[in-house]
Amino acid sequence: MCPDDSWQSTASLDALRERAKLLSFVRQFFDARDVLEVETPVMARHGVSDIHIDSVSVDTRPAPCFSGGQCFLQTSPEYHMKRLLACGSGAIYQVFRGFRDGERGPRHNPEFSLLEWYRPGFDDHALMDEVGELVSGWLGIVVPERVPYRRLFLDTLDVDPMLADVKSLRRLAGEAAGDAGFAADLDRDACLDILMTHCIEPALRSRPAVFVHDYPASQAALARTRIVDGFPVAHRFELYLSGVEICNGYWELTDVAEQRRRFVADNRARRLAGKVEMPIDENLMAALDSGLPDCAGVALGLDRLLMCGLKKKAISDVMAFPIERA
C-alpha cells in the first residue's frame, strides 16, 4: 500500500495540457514545411560512444530471427535517422523518448522527451534559422542572437579558449568549481566544459536566447570542421534560453573514415576513464559509406523547452512521472 502521495503526477494538469499543445505545435510546424515524421527503434545493439554520456544497457533473450544478448536504450535517434536519410527519406523529424543512465537533477531525468530533425541541403546556420523560428514561435520571444564560442569566452572571462594553455585552464576551472585541486588532471576540453557550465551559462541567464556556435574542433562530435582565424572549429551550435541549454546541432559529418576515427578516439577515452567501450554501429558506417546527403541536424530537449515556457525550475514540474515515481 502506498504510504504517501508518491503515486501522483509531479506535473500539474495545466503543465500536461501545455505539453500536449507543444507536441501539436511541433507537428503543425513541420507539416507546414513538408518535413516527414518518422519513428525509429528505442532499443538497439549499439550505444553512444561519447565519454560524457552513458547508455542504459538491456539484456535480451533469444527469439525467432533474433539471437538476443546485450542491447541499449537509445540516447537519441540520430544513428537510425541518418540511415533513413541515406535511404533517400528527405527531410525528417521525430518526437523521441531518449534514455541516459545516471542522470537525475533539476534539468535531467534518465528518460526524457527529445525532438530531433534533419534537413538535407542545410548547413548549421540555415538550421539555426529554423530552430529560431520554432522556439521563438512557441515561446513568443525574439529571434535568438548568435555568438561564436571563442568570442563568448573572451567577452565573459577574458580567456581565449583557443590559445590559453592547459595549466591556466586547470587553474581557472578549479577556481570556478571552488576546489583548487579539482581540475588538476583534467584535459583541455574538460576544463572548458567546467568554465562553460560554472561561468558562461550563469552569465547567459540575462540574455533571452543565444546561439553559441563555432565550438573548438575537439568538441565537434559528429559535426564537420573548418578553419576560422587560423583555428579549427566545428560546424556545431547550441541554443541557450536564459542560460538553459536547449539543443545541440551540427552540419553533419559525412566522411565515413573520419567518423570511424572519432568513434575509435571516443572509445579510447572511455577506456582510459574506466568506462565500458561501446560497439561501433556498423549499420551507420555502411549508411555513411553509401552516401549520406549533405545535411544539418539538431536534437532539442522538449522537456526543457516546456520548462522555459512555463518558467519552471525543475524537470519534474513538466513531467508526469520522473524516475523516482515511475
Image (cartoon, grey):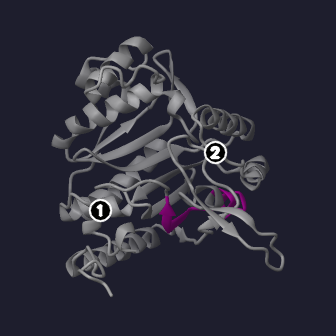
Q: Earlier in the sequence, mark 1 or mark 2?
A: 2
Task: Name which residue type carries label 2.
Answer: Val
> What crowding class fits label 2: few (fewer than 14 Cα within 10 Å), some (14-19), or many (20 or more)?
few
The quarter of the displayed image where residue 312 is located: bottom left
State the quadrant of the N terminus: bottom left
Q: Is residue 92 magenta?
A: yes
Q: Which disc, if any, is residue 49?
A: none
User: Which residue sits at x=75%, y=65%?
Assistant: 69
User: Which residue sits at x=70%, y=39%?
Assistant: 255
Task: Name which residue type carries label 1.
Answer: Ile
Q: State whether residue 311 is above or below residue 222.
A: below
Label 1, label 2: how many angstroms apart (C-alpha)?
A: 29 Å
Q: Which disc, if any, is residue 276?
A: 2
Say whether marks 1 and 2 touch (CB < 8 Å). no
In percent of width and height, residue 276 lies at: 64, 45
In percent of width and height, residue 19 lies at: 31, 74
Q: Is residue 128 magenta?
A: no
Which residue position is annotated with label 1? 315
Which residue is most to the left?
206
State the quadrant of the C terminus: bottom left
- In this orientation, which residue lies closer to the viewer: 114 or 1? 1
- In this orientation, which residue lies closer to the viewer: 160 or 66? 66
Q: Secondary structure at mark 1?
A: helix
* Residue 263 showing in the rendered view: yes
* Residue 322 showing in the rendered view: no
- In this orientation, which residue lies closer to the viewer: 239 or 185? 185
Q: Secondary structure at mark 2?
A: loop
Please give the range of residues in magenta.
82-99
User: Which residue sits at x=22%, y=38%?
Assistant: 202
